[in-house]
Each structure stands twice: as C-alpha cells, then as structure tokens.
C-alpha cells in the first residue's frame, strides 16, 4: 500500500492561474512531511518541511499546508519557471529514509 | 548551505564493466547518505542507506553484490555498479542528511548511467 499519494499526476496551468497540488499520506505518527521540486535531469531541490497539522510555510509563490491526512502545495499566480515536478515525501520507519510520492508534473504556459 | 555534489554527471560504459559514482556533501557532515535510482517519468526508488563506517542497508530487491556502496567518511559515499548491463541504465541520485533521523535530505544533481 502506497504511503504517499499525489494528485493530480499532471497539471497544466496558464501563467497567473493559481491552483493546488495534493499529497495524502497513510503513515501513522507523522514525523514530518517534505516537499521537493525536481527539474528534468536534476536531483530534487528541497522546498519545505511540515511537522504538525495546521502548519504553513511559504516561499515566493508557493505555500505548503498540512492537515492530519494530507498536505497541499498552493501555487499563486504561477510563472513558466515554476514548471517542474513537485514531490512530497514522508519518513519511513527504521532509519527513516524518505519515501516519495510519484509527483505532480506541473506545466505553466505563458 | 547543504550542497551535495555527484561525479560524474553522466557516464557511458560497456556491458560487463564497472562504474563508480561519487557523492560528496560539500558544506556539512552527513550522518547518513542514501542512494536512489529513477527511471524516466517515475519517482525515486530508494536503493540503500549508509552510515559512515557501517555497512549499507539495501532495500528489498536490490542486489548488494551488484551495487557496492562505500561510505568511507562523513562527506563521501560511493556507489559502484559492477558488471553493468543495459538494464542498469538509469538516473542515480544520492542524498545526504545531517542531524536527527527526521530531517531534510539534500540531493545531489544525479548521474545518468548508460550501459551499451
């Protein structure tokens, strides 16, 4: 069973058209939820960590929020340079490496 | 801060040969390093976890004799793909973490391996 599910799989937006990406998780006792951005042919770039329900973090046009069951990445007035795959991840048990969702491929059209 | 480098960024090798990929944390000491592989349009799949001076812990289905991991210091980990075959062609990405077990992982830029 997937621990992290992201939706939609792909999203196409016009420049300036705000939207949200979803990440739902099934792990119990969440010890952090992580958002990354990945450009084609590159490693993921860290964006945010959220630890508790109700927490919010912002960076430029991005805002991440967390509830007890899911996280949202809100993109306000996106620009073409925001086009990328956005990944969310939660720690696994044991040595707690991050387990990643399949990502949302975002395309912002000028 | 929190910069991770990988070398080489891409490599082409012949089937049956071995190739080594280096991963370095440039501005911090990494208590734990991770190796992932990623196929086109798929998410990252964890291959192994390593702590400095200890043997790596491999994920189920990953051949430890084929993918040799050495975490010789707090800033360097290497992945050697032995007797490479075309099906080993993939994008390999390392990641490093410092601090508590639940903290951010910082990723290298990745290495594109093509086996001909």
Image (spheres, helix red, strand yellow):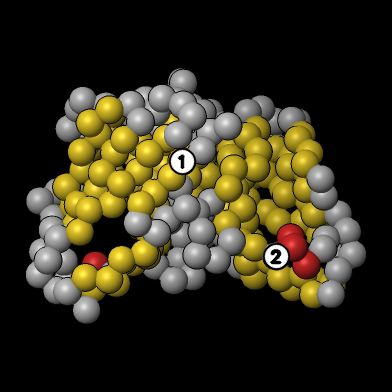
**Residue drawn 30% across the image and 46% down it:** B22
Identify the chain of the residue marked 1, using the numbered disc in the image: B
Image location (x, y in percent) of residue B6: 39, 49
Identify which residue, B95 or A87, lies in the foreground. B95
Quadrant in which the C terminus of chain B appears? bottom left
Residue A23 on image: x %, y %: 63, 50
B42 and A23: which is toward the camera: B42
Q: Is residue B95 above or below residue A8?
A: above
Q: Quadrant of the N terminus of chain B?
A: top right
Q: Nearer the viewer, mark 2 or mark 1?
A: 1
Query: Percent x, y for residue B14?
Result: 17, 74
The residue positioned 35% from the left and 31% from the top of the image is B75
Q: Pick the residue in front: A26 or A44.
A: A44
Q: Quadrant of residue A67?
A: top right
Task: Report which quarter residue A12 is drawn in.
Answer: bottom right
Compared to B20, does B57 lie above or below? above
Disc 2 + disc 1, Cβ < 8 Å: no
Residue B114 visible here: yes
Q: Residues within 10 Å of mark 1 (few under 14, many from 20)?
A: many
- Residue behind mark 2: A83
Q: Could you tell me residue A107's position as x and y percent?
A: 71, 70
Q: Report in which chain the residue with disc 2 lies.
A: A
Question: Gap between marks 2 and 1, in whole Å?
Answer: 23 Å
Residue matched to label 1: B4
Question: What residue is shown at x 45% (from left), y 66% (from top)?
Answer: B42
The residue depicted at 77 percent of the width and 56 percent of the height is A20
The kind of secondary structure element at disc 2 is loop
- Callout 2: 10 Å neighbours few (<14), some, many (20+)? many
Asked whether, in this view, residue B37 is left or right of residue B79, the answer is right
Left or right placement of residue B52 versus residue A106 in this view: left
Q: Which of the pair A52/B43 is nearer the observer?
A: B43
Q: Quadrant of residue B81?
A: bottom left
């Amino acid at each position: 069973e997937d621990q992290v599910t992201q939706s939609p799989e792909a999203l196409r937006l016009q420049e300036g058209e705000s939207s949200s990406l979803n990440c739902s998780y099934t792990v119990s006792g969440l010890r952090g939820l992580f958002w990354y951005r990945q450009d084609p042919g590159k490693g993921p770039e860290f964006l945010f960590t959220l630890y508790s329900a109700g927490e919010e973090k912002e960076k430029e046009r991005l805002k991440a929020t967390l509830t007890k069951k899911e996280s949202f990445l809100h993109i306000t007035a996106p620009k073409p340079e925001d086009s990328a795959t956005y990944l969310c991840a939660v720690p696994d048990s044991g040595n707690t490496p991050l387990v990643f969702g399949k990502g949302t491929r975002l395309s912002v059209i000028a | 801060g929190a910069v991770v480098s990988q070398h080489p960024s891409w490599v082409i090798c012949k089937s049956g040969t071995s190739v080594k990929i280096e991963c370095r944390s440039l501005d911090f000491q990494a208590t734990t390093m991770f190796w992932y592989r990623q196929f086109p349009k798929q998410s990252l799949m964890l291959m192994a976890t390593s702590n400095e001076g200890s043997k790596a812990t491999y994920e189920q289905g990953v051949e430890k004799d084929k993918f040799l991991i050495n975490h010789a210091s707090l800033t360097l980990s290497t992945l050697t793909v032995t007797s490479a075959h075309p099906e080993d062609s993939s994008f390999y990405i390392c990641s490093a973490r410092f601090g508590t077990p639940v903290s951010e992982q910082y990723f290298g830029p990745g290495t594109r391996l093509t086996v001909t």
